[in-house]
């Protein structure tokens, strides 16, 4: 069936698949290096406790069958290995069926992780990776030309990502309609990057232009994805440029990168298509059945997208096959940070020797310049931003973090940039304070070398110690 395939997109498929495999690799690496402290057997939100109360039907995962930290690590590193093989092009060297299995493995493994990840994995880019990864299973390999229906569905995802994000902004915070949100956003975003300070200090008229351009890119340009070439390629290219601008302005995990990956699938390159055989009948039937199912499942995200009560980042099925997306429907005007400190003194007083814990990505020491981490995702740092917005966001895990700091737990300390206490001498007490952070001015930067200025607001957590001393625990 000539209508079934789009041979002119063979290079688009190749670029898309290799780029998606890189994102998978980063996601599995993030899981492998961080899971023990976050949700391992002794983690802040242990997986065994979660699967004991949530059924397999509600959250399908291999970890319902069994869980151990060793098994989780094996799954994560296996995901890294398969992703690396896909980056290297192994799917092009095997038969079509085997290639589909290769793409199915990282999707199933990552689904298993996300579905037990709880609040650590509750963000839109997790579902987006799963939705895109599922479609990648049916995109084929070098044996056949790319199926047009799958390419269309990839554009459909890109449309929902961008258009949904545009709608949530227009319906949400008034500063998006007034074109003033970027007066605050670069300063108050969850995890600033090394250039965020400079973005914040751009002239305000340029900030207005940025917001206006964002509205155009998210509310008008996505419609052009479904127009003939070369208009669709131009629309996708504009989206890529916009996402790269966002990459420069902050750390947003792999959200921007996977959006770029999606846009790459809509670009038609000038290279000629190689001669390939027609797709087998079983493959055509399978792709059409899956496509029909995904179109039916799209009812819920479309209904949400056109609703006045639009919600962001929601999955409508436990397999995360079709989801709704959106970001920054509201923008904070003031930045708060939770600063965690410990002391070895037997009696905690205000004048005790309080030493500050340093996180890798979130602001802490006013003189320490933010670093670029994305697409690698610092999950604890990201959740600390939510903890500063309201203690309610951290109610399920912040106490566990404090307990592990009091124990000098090695897995937890590996998530931090630096602990102020030796490995064999944990603090006696830990406390947390809430601080107001703002970017310094150009003059303050020259005079002090600090990119942040912070002011104490109030106590966040009073001095806390272990109920049972560690010596007695042993």
Image (cartoon, rainbow, N blue to C red):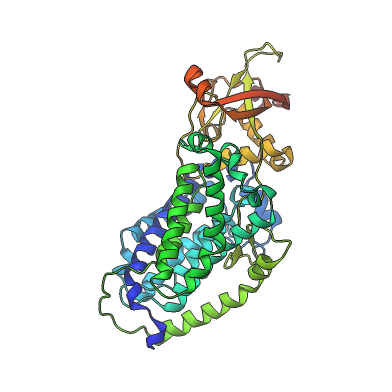
Percent of width and height locating residue 354: 63, 17
Q: Residue furthest top?
A: 351
Percent of width and height locating residue 147: 41, 78
Q: Quadrant of residue 387?
A: top right
* Total numbered labels: 0
Residue 299 appears anywhere in the view? yes
Percent of width and height locating residue 97: 38, 75
In this rendered view, identify the residue nearer to me: 289 or 312.
312
Q: Is residue 271 left or right of residue 174?
A: left
Percent of width and height locating residue 430: 66, 24
Q: Quadrant of residue 260?
A: bottom left
Q: Quadrant of residue 312?
A: bottom right
In this rendered view, identify the residue nearer to me: 48 or 34.
34
Residue 192 appears anywhere in the view? no
Q: Residue at x 73, y 63 (%)?
A: 308
Q: Residue at x 69, y 35 (%)?
A: 399
| Position above or below: 209 against 269 | above
| Position above or below: 358 against 294 | above
Q: Is residue 94 left or right of residue 330?
A: left
In this rendered view, identify the residue nearer to me: 101 or 340.
340
Quadrant of the image containing the N terminus = bottom left
| Position above or below: 347 against 392 | above
Q: Residue at x 52, y 82 (%)?
A: 289
Quadrant of the image containing the C terminus = top right
Q: Is residue 144 left or right of residue 136?
A: left
């Amino acid at each position: 069936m000539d209508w079934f395939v789009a041979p002119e997109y063979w290079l688009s498929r190749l670029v898309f698949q290799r780029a998606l495999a890189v994102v998978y690799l980063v996601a599995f690496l993030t899981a492998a290096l961080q899971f023990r402290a976050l949700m391992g057997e002794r983690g802040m939100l242990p997986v065994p406790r979660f699967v004991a109360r949530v059924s397999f039907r509600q959250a399908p995962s291999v970890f319902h069958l069994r869980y151990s930290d060793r098994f989780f690590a094996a799954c994560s590193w296996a995901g890294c290995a398969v992703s690396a093989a896909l980056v290297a092009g192994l799917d092009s060297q095997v038969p079509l069926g085997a290639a589909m299995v290769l793409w199915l493995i990282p999707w199933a493994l990552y689904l298993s992780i996300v579905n037990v990840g709880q609040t650590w994995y509750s963000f839109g880019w997790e579902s987006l990776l799963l939705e895109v990864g599922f479609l990648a299973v049916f995109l084929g390999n070098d044996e056949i030309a790319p199926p047009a229906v799958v390419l269309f569905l990839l554009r459909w995802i890109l449309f929902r990502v961008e258009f949904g994000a545009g709608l949530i902004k227009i319906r949400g915070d008034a500063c998006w309609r007034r074109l003033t949100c970027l007066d605050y956003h670069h300063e108050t975003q969850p995890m600033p990057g090394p250039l965020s300070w400079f973005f914040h200090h751009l002239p305000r008229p340029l900030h207005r232009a940025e917001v206006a351009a964002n509205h155009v890119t998210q509310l008008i340009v996505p419609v052009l994805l479904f127009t003939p070439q070369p208009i669709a390629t131009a629309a996708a290219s504009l989206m890529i440029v916009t996402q790269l601008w966002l990459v420069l302005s902050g750390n947003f995990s792999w959200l921007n990168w996977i959006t770029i990956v999606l846009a790459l699938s809509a670009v038609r390159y000038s290279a000629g298509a190689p001669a390939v055989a027609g797709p087998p009948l079983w493959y055509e039937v399978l792709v059409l059945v899956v496509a029909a199912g995904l179109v039916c499942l799209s009812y819920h995200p479309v209904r949400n997208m056109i609703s006045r009560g639009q919600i962001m980042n929601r999955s409508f099925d436990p397999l995360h096959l079709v989801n709704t997306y959106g970001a920054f429907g509201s923008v904070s005007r003031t930045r708060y940070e939770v600063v965690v400190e410990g002391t070895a003194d037997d009696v905690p007083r205000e004048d005790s020797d309080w030493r500050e814990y340093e996180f890798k990505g979130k602001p802490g020491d006013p003189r320490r310049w933010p670093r670029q981490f994305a697409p690698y995702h610092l999950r604890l740092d990201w959740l600390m931003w939510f903890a500063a917005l309201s203690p309610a966001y951290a109610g399920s895990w912040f106490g566990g973090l404090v307990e592990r700091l009091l124990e000098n737990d090695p897995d937890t300390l590996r998530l931090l940039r630096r602990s102020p206490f030796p490995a064999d001498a944990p603090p006696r007490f830990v406390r947390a304070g809430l601080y107001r952070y703002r970017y310094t001015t150009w003059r303050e930067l020259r005079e002090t070398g600090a990119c942040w200025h912070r002011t104490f607001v109030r106590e966040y957590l009073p001095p806390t110690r272990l109920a049972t001393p560690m010596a007695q625990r042993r």
